[in-house]
Amino acid sequence: MKIGVKNRTRIITIIVLLYILLFSYAAISKILDFENFQVQLGQSPLLSAFAFEISYLVPFAEIVIVLTLLKTSWRYFGLLGSLILMTLFSSYIFIVLHYTSFVPCSCGGILEKMSWNSHLLFNLFFVLLAIVSIVFYLSLNPTATTRLLQKRTVNIIVISLVTSVTFMIALFLYSEAIMQYHNPFIRRYPQHPVSFQSSIDLKYNSYYFAGFAKDRIYLGNYSNPLQLLSVDPLLKNRKSISISNAPKKLLFKSVKILLQPPYFYLVDGVVGRMYKGNMSNWVITTELRGSPYFTKAVSMTNGAFVIRSNIGQDGAHILGIFDAVQRKRVRYDSTLLQQKIDGIFDTDGTLLYNASWNRWVYLYYYRNVFLVGKDNLELDYRGHTIDTTTQAKIKIAYLKNKQQRKMAAPPLIVNAHAALEQHLLFVHSLVKGQLENDKLWQEASILDLYNLENKSYRFSFALYRLPGKKMSAFFIANEHLYALFGTHLAVYNWNTLLKKELKKGTKKKSSP
């Protein structure tokens, strides 16, 4: 059926008015809530790396298109711009739904109530309207220019569609590379990687995570060093465990219990002692002779320990390995911890080990560097967390003729706590990234996730605190996240997104 000139004119007018209404509303809502709009773009799994630039470009483009649609002589370019912009939006939603690691929250405004699939259909409908209006517009304007354009209408529309889709795909691929391997300190927050399950009051705030075995979490107690608390994943069944046959004459000063099933270790680096027992009866059976003095230690599956000591030059920290089974000797490597200020405070950090992945990790507290190494102390690689703190922001005071040193001012802690589950590194960061909400930081602890196998940043998530409590430690085991908040122990279940990340093992050569 042939559509008459008047009807085509009416259709064009209606489509133009719809686009003016849509883009005017969209631009104004973005400008009025600009900070939130930037935050939403920063959390996008597709546009994160360009969130700052796009937050200005999109409302500007929408306003320009509205102005060109209002002026009759520019209307063709306004319709063509509408087609391109709506195709870009549609491509964005399609890629988010089918090719990104997670689907972010919906955008604000009147479209907030729409699902992503509904939003895609809405956009595609407006793409179709733009195509119809361009075809009708050229048929109503018989100038030499429009006659030439009319002959090439199909080519112009196809090129616009293909170019827009190609551009969005390229933007996605480029943004992914930047976010995962050259992150400009923009965090991604997918929806609910973990969900709160339950919490219990332990009555004391002196507990620490000793390890995990047979579907139970074990907590040591600094105040009662020969006692362990065993808890099931639901936090319903608690069991107190006493370690027996500990040496009575030795004056322990800094006792810690380490689990490496089926064995447990009672260690004290201040006095340089290590003891071993079996978890079947919790009886100490062996002293690991030749133990060095150390400030941190993790036990490995081969019976050796990665340790950190302060026997380096001028008391600087140094990493070593203590072979408690074979040669019973210590070997240090002074090249691993790189001194930039004093070698003590600036190299302070967290030492982790994962038996499933057979790697140790050392993460600095005050700068964005971590080390990944093998069980023979060989360095695998140095990586970086996504924050930009390359130099420790600390001030040191030297006392008693420089024989003692102390922090002269509160330091900027970058990486407060960490946990390692196979090749996934979870980092509790205390540094706010770009485009992040102050309220979020007031109410939650922010955890960043890294895939150490392909050396990439994956995403971040908020661990909302228990009322009036700050997180003092956390532990990952058996697809659960355990966290200590003062005297309370809380457990969070992993959701699908985290489970998928655990299964990813593709290796890439780029470094984070």
Image: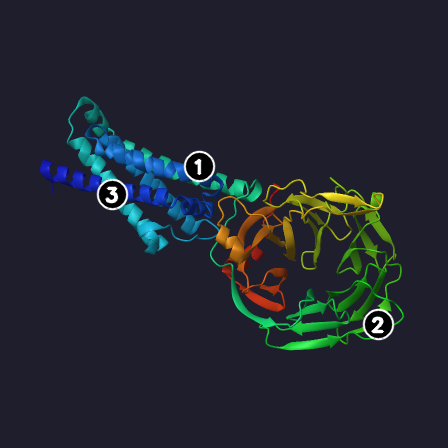
Q: The disc labelled 1 sits on which kind of residue?
A: Glu
Between marks 1 and 2, how big is the CA–CA gap?
Answer: 63 Å
Instruction: Give the answer, above or below, for where 297 lies relative to 396.
Output: below
Between marks 3 and 2, how big is the CA–CA gap?
Answer: 78 Å
Between marks 1 and 3, how big is the CA–CA gap?
Answer: 24 Å
The residue lying furthest to the front in this view is 400
Disc 3 residue crowd, few under 14, some 14–19, many 20+, Cα 10 Å: few
Instruction: Give the answer, above or below, for where 233 lies relative to 329.
Output: below
In the rendered image, which quarter contains the C terminus? top right
| Residue 154 in view | no
Q: Quadrant of residue 252?
A: bottom right
Q: Secondary structure at mark 1?
A: helix
Disc 2 residue crowd, few under 14, some 14–19, many 20+, Cα 10 Å: some
Q: Quadrant of residue 23?
A: top left
Which of 158 and 475 lies nearest the eye of the viewer?
475
Q: Secondary structure at mark 2?
A: loop
Mark toward the start of the polypeptide (1 vs 3): 3
Mark toward the start of the polypeptide (3 vs 2): 3
Residue that mark 1 sits on: 53
Which of 327 and 151 lies nearest the eye of the viewer?
327
In percent of width and height, residue 332 lies at: 83, 48
- Label at residue 246: 2
Residue that mark 3 sits on: 21
Mark toward the start of the polypeptide (1 vs 2): 1
